[in-house]
Image (spheres, rainbow, N blue to C red):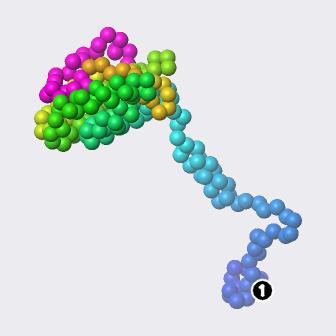
Amino acid sequence: MTRRRGGAPAALRPPAPTERCAPGAFWRPGPWACALALALVVSGCASKTPKPTPASEAVAAVDQVLAGMTEGLEAKDATALASQWDPSEREAARARIRDGLDRADGSGPADLRLTLLAVRAQGQRRLARVAWSGTWGGRKVAGTFEMELTGDDPPAIVALRGDDPVDAAATGPAEPSIPGAPDGAGELEAPAP
């Protein structure tokens, strides 16, 4: 009488062979280990961040300056606002900003939003067009300005043309003085979403 191995009761069956490596033997990965390794490699490649482009670096630099400007405007802090300027322009900017804030009488809170419209790298400089809007002392204010930044890290403002938020706070609401694309502004790149 022949018995098949699987037909014997569990207690009578010989133990199943185990995959143990003898000392000095190499471990052989099963198909599950290869699949796991492949999944780890693929997920590692997918999680890498893309290398920044010159355009994305320019947008990040302008955003950094705009964040500092927003904090300084809302705090009505001339020193914080002037710190965004290039050292060669900083003292003149501080005097102009302080004068604008004094003329605004500091009445009421400032709640402004600065939005980057376009940016372009030009040699060692960055040119940016910015729209801004919000309230200053309970009045609605809005405008558009262009600024020139150094190519340094951190960037600094070299020049600002158009509707300066500090001046608008002192003089009242203003219509944007740059309604369309000014000369050369058509070449500016819009920031990526």
Image spot of residue 99 (x, y percent) = 24, 28
Query: Looking at this view, is 151 or 191 the one in front?
Result: 151
Instruction: Please report the residue visible at 56 percent of the width from the left and 49 percent of the height from the top.
Output: 43
The total of numbered circles placed on residues is 1
Dividing the picture into quadrants, the one containing residue 100 is top left
**Residue in the picture at 24% in, 17% down:** 178
What's the residue at 32%, 10% (across, down)? Answer: 183
Q: Which residue of the protein is positioned furthest toward the right in this rendering?
A: 24
Query: Per the image, is 34 magenta?
Result: no
In what quadrant of the picture does the N terminus appear? bottom right
Q: Main secondary structure of the magenta part?
A: loop
Residue 168: % across, % down: 19, 27
Write down the residue under mark 1: 1
User: Is 141 on the left or on the right of 7, as rendered?
Assistant: left
Q: Is residue 130 left or right of residue 52?
A: left
Quadrant placement of the C terminus: top left
| Residue 132 seen in render | no
Give residue 18's position: percent from left, percent from top.
Answer: 75, 74
Give the quadrant of residue 14: bottom right
Q: Amino acid at mark 1?
A: Met
Residue 166 percent coordinates (x, y): 24, 29
* Magenta range: 163-189
- Of helix, strand and loop, which one carries label 1? loop
Answer above or below: position of 28 versus 18. above
Horizontal relation, residue 134 to residue 43: left or right: left
Which of the two residues, 59 or 1, is positioned nearer the viewer here?
59
